[in-house]
């Protein structure tokens, strides 16, 4: 029972007591019981009773008023990604709720634990096309792990308890609870809040089967060229140490997916780079050379596999995943290892025999040298006058020593950041991997800072994506989120332009984007900033940004037609990765 | 892998909106649900969906994993036609004068085991149950005699090699006891309930 609901009489021990409270207050009590301290949201007519109740909770529940509901949910995603907690969002009915859809889809595909609370019109008006009524349950069904409409206040405690349980357990995901206005206002006998730990039809973690662990260990022990690919499952399972122990025991080369970045420190001796379309040369090529491919907490996205019919056909595949639906979904598995990798990895490690794969690891290093020579050297140490995105990231790495949280938007700058940013700590890469949502970066960075306010949070954003959600500068201004905004401006929608150049005969159809004076815009929001276009100013400008006590916007003008390489072109096998 | 007819059986919680969530799993892959039936199951509070689709087995297996992943779905099974006992029901409305004047029609109805539901001066309604081919054949025949209306019900199916959901529910509940365990008089009474 929450203390705010208990009464003490005659100095006796406080006893749980049934009290009549509104549905709105029950909701806020439930959030406190779930240890929620930060909510991102935007009020409106159909959620006003909840906001009215929130007025009395301002000491315990921090509410960040965003400038658009899309900003609220991306911020909640950023919060969840850096804090490891569940992100919470408030929005009103109709347009407020529909503005969450992009973020829900993003959170669904990237497995972010989010609980969205939306207001809804009075239950008596449901289905009448009432003012600001939308069928939010049906709209959000395909992009939520679970959703539920509350029409009676008595349902609120159980619905919220289920929502938090579902959002955070198993493979995490977004949950939406739609609460009608009458349920928010209704008084009912609140008998206390019970957390949910079990739902009959929901089994978040599949049973671990020893015979599969044994078969997987046998395959790894016999392998001459084992290769590990790891995803966000390592981070979500809080299995970073278990993962490190696993690969270190037998010297297994390991490559990250975009979502797996930061699960293993970038400089770890067994980290052989990033996989996928704009990943590193060696891990892509060696995928089609290895004899045993061990996938840990990743889902074989098409951006990782390229052409499926030519993907690792020579390899036996071991797939460790908490979600049984991922097994065999895209890549046929030889041995499935169902379960949370925090539990399955140590079981597997215990059965591994000491082994040394240094010759095999050396092959990755040889290819890495080739990539350095052909791509990385020019990108990080360009001889041209124009700055490259890569060199900006390199200087940023030097100054932050790989300890910053890097939140990115979507596009060329994202791929460059993912390729070159150094991550020493887990949960320090925040990006929209599955949905590729432009506009994600700025609000996600705000949320990331609230999730880890002790860290330096750098939002790396392109000129296109920034203009999709730049109104969130207002949130930064009002609430003082100390986000460093680094805009890499190439005056193009760069990734689309790159594709047009390579695959559409340079027909640059509507990718030339004009931007406002970003520094002046930031100044309008009382955020300091500067714009540079000369290499000689880069280091000092980044130092100024990082040392500034508060939010800061740095716009760096980079080469207009630089491309991100290497690249696995669409329809190609990963081993056909192009270096130029 | 060739496409064939599969019957998918889902055991679910009885939740509002679940049908939309399930239908979405098929529609986003552009797979047509040829037949859909929902009904209570042998366990109180647990519902049973029976769906028919034509797909290859690999796709069906993946679909079942996606279906089972839904919070309110307890279990998903898929079976080929020879692994199930199945029925579909049909109603036929034919002109009364045709049936009364042409003895052949009466024979036809007998042959297909149809029975009379309603007799009026202007029309007669028959019903029959059986496999789709049987129903289709009767429909084709009655069409020749001025079939006025026809409707076929969704498939219902019993899996031949199945002990129902009792054991599964008990297994789940033993592993992770529910705070609100559903007490059901049939639980643990499988031998008395099933005679197959």
Image (cartoon, coloured by chain):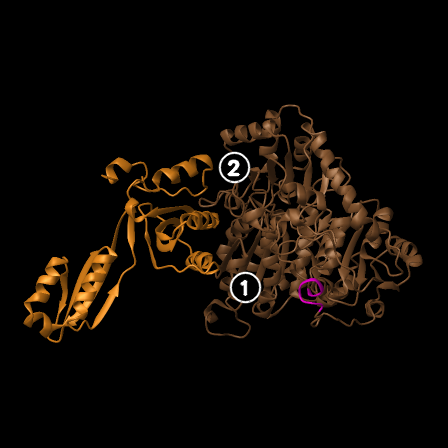
- From the top left corner, tell me how far across and down residue A465 is, in percent: 72, 64
Residue nearest the viewer, comparing A110 with A82: A110
Residue A1 in sight in this render? no
Q: Which region shows up in magenta?
A: A500-506
Residue, disc 2: A334
Q: Residue A232 is drawn in which quadrant?
A: top right
Please report whichever mark, 1 or 2, sits nearer to the chain's N-terminal start: 1
Q: Secondary structure at mark 2?
A: loop
Residue, disc 1: A185
A346 left or right of A447?
left
Give the total number of marks visible in the rendering: 2
User: What colour do you see for chain B?
Assistant: orange
Label 2 Cα crowd, 10 Å radius (few <14 / some 14-19 / many 20+):
some
A464 left or right of B183?
right
Residue nearest the viewer, comparing B64 with A530: B64
Residue A502 falls within the magenta-colored stretch: yes
Q: Secondary structure at mark 1?
A: helix
């Amino acid at each position: 029972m929450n203390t705010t609901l208990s009464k003490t009489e005659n100095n006796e021990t406080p006893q749980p007591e049934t009290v009549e409270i509104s549905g709105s207050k029950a909701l806020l009590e439930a959030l406190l019981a779930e240890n929620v301290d930060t909510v991102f949201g935007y009020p409106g007519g159909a959620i006003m009773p909840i906001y009215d109740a929130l007025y009395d909770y301002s000491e315990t529940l921090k509410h960040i008023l965003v400038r658009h509901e899309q900003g609220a949910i991306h911020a909640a995603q950023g919060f969840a990604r850096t804090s490891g907690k569940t992100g919470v969002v408030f929005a009103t009915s109709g347009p407020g709720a529909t503005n969450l859809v992009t973020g829900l889809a993003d959170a669904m595909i990237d497995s972010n634990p989010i609980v969205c609370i939306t207001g809804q019109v009075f239950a008596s008006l449901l289905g009448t096309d009432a003012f600001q009524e939308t069928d939010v349950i049906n709209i959000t069904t395909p992009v939520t792990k679970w959703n539920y409409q509350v029409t009676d206040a008595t349902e609120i405690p159980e619905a919220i308890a289920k929502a938090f349980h579902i959002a955070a357990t198993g493979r995490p995901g977004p949950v939406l609870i739609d609460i009608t206005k009458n349920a928010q206002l209704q008084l009912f006998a609140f008998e206390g809040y019970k957390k949910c730990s079990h739902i009959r039809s929901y089994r978040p973690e599949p049973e671990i089967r020893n015979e599969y662990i044994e078969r997987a260990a046998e395959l790894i022990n016999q392998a001459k060229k084992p290769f590990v690919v790891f995803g966000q499952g390592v981070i979500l399972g809080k299995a970073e140490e278990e993962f490190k122990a696993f690969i270190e025991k037998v010297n297994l080369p390991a490559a990250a997916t975009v979502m797996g970045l930061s699960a293993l420190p970038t400089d770890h001796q067994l980290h052989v780079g990033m996989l996928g379309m704009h990943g590193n040369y060696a891990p892509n090529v060696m995928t089609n050379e290895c004899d045993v491919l061990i996938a840990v907490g990743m889902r074989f996205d098409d951006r990782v596999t390229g052409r499926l019919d030519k993907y690792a056909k020579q390899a036996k595949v071991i797939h460790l995943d908490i979600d049984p639906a991922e097994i065999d979904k895209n890549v046929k598995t030889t041995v499935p290892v169902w379960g949370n990798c925090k539990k399955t990895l140590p079981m597997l490690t215990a059965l591994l025999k000491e082994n040394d794969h240094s010759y095999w690891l050396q092959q990755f290093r040889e290819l890495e040298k080739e990539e350095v020579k052909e791509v990385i050297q020019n990108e990080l140490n360009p001889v041209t006058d124009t700055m490259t995105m890569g060199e900006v990231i390199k200087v940023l790495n030097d100054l932050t020593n790989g300890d910053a949280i890097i939140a990115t938007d979507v596009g060329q700058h994202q791929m460059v950041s993912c390729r070159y940013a150094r991550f020493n700590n887990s949960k320090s890469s925040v990006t929209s991997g599955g949905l590729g949502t432009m506009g994600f970066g700025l609000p996600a960075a705000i949320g990331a800072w609230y999730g880890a306010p002790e860290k330096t949070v750098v939002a790396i954003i392109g000129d296109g994506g920034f203009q999709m959600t730049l109104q969130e500068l207002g949130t930064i201004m009002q609430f003082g989120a100390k986000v460093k905004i680094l805009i890499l401006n190439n005056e193009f929608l760069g990734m689309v332009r790159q594709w047009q150049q390579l695959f559409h005969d340079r027909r640059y159809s509507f990718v030339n984007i004009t931007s406002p004076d970003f520094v002046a815009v930031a100044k309008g929001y009382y955020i300091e900033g500067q714009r540079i276009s000369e290499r000689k100013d880069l280091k000092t400008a980044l130092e100024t940004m990082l040392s500034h006590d508060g939010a800061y916007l740095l716009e760096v003008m980079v080469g207009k037609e630089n491309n991100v390489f290497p690249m696995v072109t669409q329809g190609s096998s990963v081993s056909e990765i192009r270096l130029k | 892998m060739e496409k064939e007819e599969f019957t998918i059986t889902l055991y679910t919680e009885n939740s509002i909106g679940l049908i939309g969530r399930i239908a979405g799993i098929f529609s986003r892959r552009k797979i047509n649900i040829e037949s859909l039936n929902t009904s209570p199951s042998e366990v109180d509070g647990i519902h049973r969906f029976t769906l028919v689709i034509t797909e290859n087995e690999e796709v069906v297996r993946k679909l079942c994993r996606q279906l089972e992943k839904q919070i309110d779905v307890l279990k998903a099974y898929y079976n080929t036609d020879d692994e199930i006992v199945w029925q579909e029901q049909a109603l036929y409305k034919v002109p009364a004068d045709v049936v009364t004047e042409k003895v052949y029609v009466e024979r036809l109805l007998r042959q297909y085991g149809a029975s009379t539901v309603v007799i009026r001066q202007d029309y007669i309604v028959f019903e029959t149950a059986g496999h789709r081919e049987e129903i289709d054949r009767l429909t084709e025949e009655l069409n020749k005699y001025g079939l006025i209306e026809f409707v076929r019900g969704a498939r219902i199916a019993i899996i031949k090699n199945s002990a129902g959901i009792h054991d599964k529910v008990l297994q789940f509940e033993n592993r992770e006891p529910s705070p609100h365990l559903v007490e059901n008089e049939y639980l643990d009474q499988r031998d008395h309930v099933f005679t197959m």
